[in-house]
Image: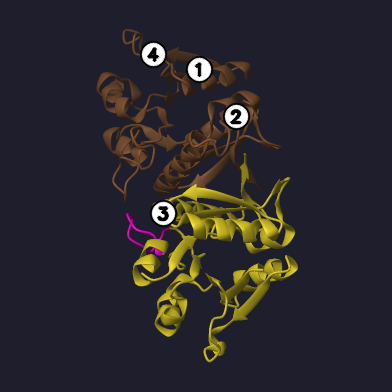
Chain colours: A brown, B yellow
Amino acid sequence: MTSVSILGKGNMGPAIASVVEKSGNTAQLLGSDDIDQPVTGDIVVLAVPYPAVSTVLEQRGDQLAGKVVVDITNPMNFETFDSLTVAPDASATAEIAAALPDSRVLKAFNTNFAATLASGTVGEQPTTVLIAGDDAEAKSQLAELVTACGLRAMDVGSLSRARELEALGLLQITLASGNKIGWTGGFALQP
Amino acid sequence: MTSVSILGKGNMGPAIASVVEKSGNTAQLLGSDDIDQPVTGDIVVLAVPYPAVSTVLEQRGDQLAGKVVVDITNPMNFETFDSLTVAPDASATAEIAAALPDSRVLKAFNTNFAATLASGTVGEQPTTVLIAGDDAEAKSQLAELVTACGLRAMDVGSLSRARELEALGLLQITLASGNKIGWTGGFALQP
């Protein structure tokens, strides 16, 4: 059994907690008011908006040592909804990995809308969680959890691929916020 | 009737020419040996590999004035298949637009594998051609052509969005070249 801690009670955190619980694994869902509760999971999902990540890392960075840390953020400019706020040759995940040298940091879930986690599908396709990272064992562990949750997992490569995942996240959010696709749709991966 | 010139006889050029002809529109397919034949189409598709673009623009740049020019390139490092060769804050399309100030430059087709143009589908979904550019009328003209070809067209925004389309192209090609998806698959857009 995998024990998962999810930091963030917004849109995505409860959606991830829900599929984890349905899979029979344990989910600990922690919000900003739960700062007195330590992180207990082996896998920790950072499900806060990108601007809140640095605060979470200040508060809980020590608790994340040795753990698989999953960055799901889309570091968007939320005023324009038209660009990323990380440097063009960087990614939020690379920044987080640099800040957490004792953690095994992965990118995942940033291209999945919350509704597609709950439904398990994007159109006719199973919802696919794209996973990037440099730690093969950590990726396998997350992929196993994702599969247990009834979703499809796809290892898309090294941590450097997080940049393309964040670009895809931006593209998909601009389409949904512009009403060109629904928040139940998006890019479905056809094998 | 739209008249389309396609520069490049590799993988994508003939695939695009084929669907254009099937739609009842006119396709002129020109390779590097056809340098004596002038471009006649109103829409010109640059279907050469990115490293060949500068040569084509030197040879035919004058012929492209006033035309809708469609950049389909994925400016990848073809040795590593692991990164883009344009500057991280740039795109091939932005470079081409700068080199062709008298043309109406669009990005399109770079996220469509050739086989999905021929089949018209990616899994259960119709093949969707993602179009980025700053000229709304040019985008409408291309979208109309794409729709006539039996494909779905999606305006994804301004020319700056070409950067994300090139990131998506890179991601998709790394998955196919790594045998994680087939060249008949890829990211299908669910509305």
Say which mark, if any, is on residue A14: 1
Image coordinates of residue B34 in percent, x first then y, are 56, 88
Left or right: B86 in relation to A128? left
Image coordinates of residue B37 in percent, x first then y, are 56, 89
Mark 3 on the same chain as mark 1: no
Give amino acid for label 4: Gly
Say which mark, if any, is on residue B163: 3
Mark 4 on the same chain as mark 3: no
Residues shaded magenta = B83-92
Distance (Cα) linking label 3 and label 2? 26 Å
> Which secondary structure is most common in the magenta stretch?
loop
Q: In this rendering, which labeled residue sits more in front, label 3 or label 2? A: 3
Is residue B40 located in the magenta-colored stretch of the structure?
no
What chain does mark 2 sit on? A
Distance (Cα) linking label 4 and label 3? 35 Å
Instruction: Determine whether the residue tagged by mark 3 lies in a helix, strand or loop.
Output: helix
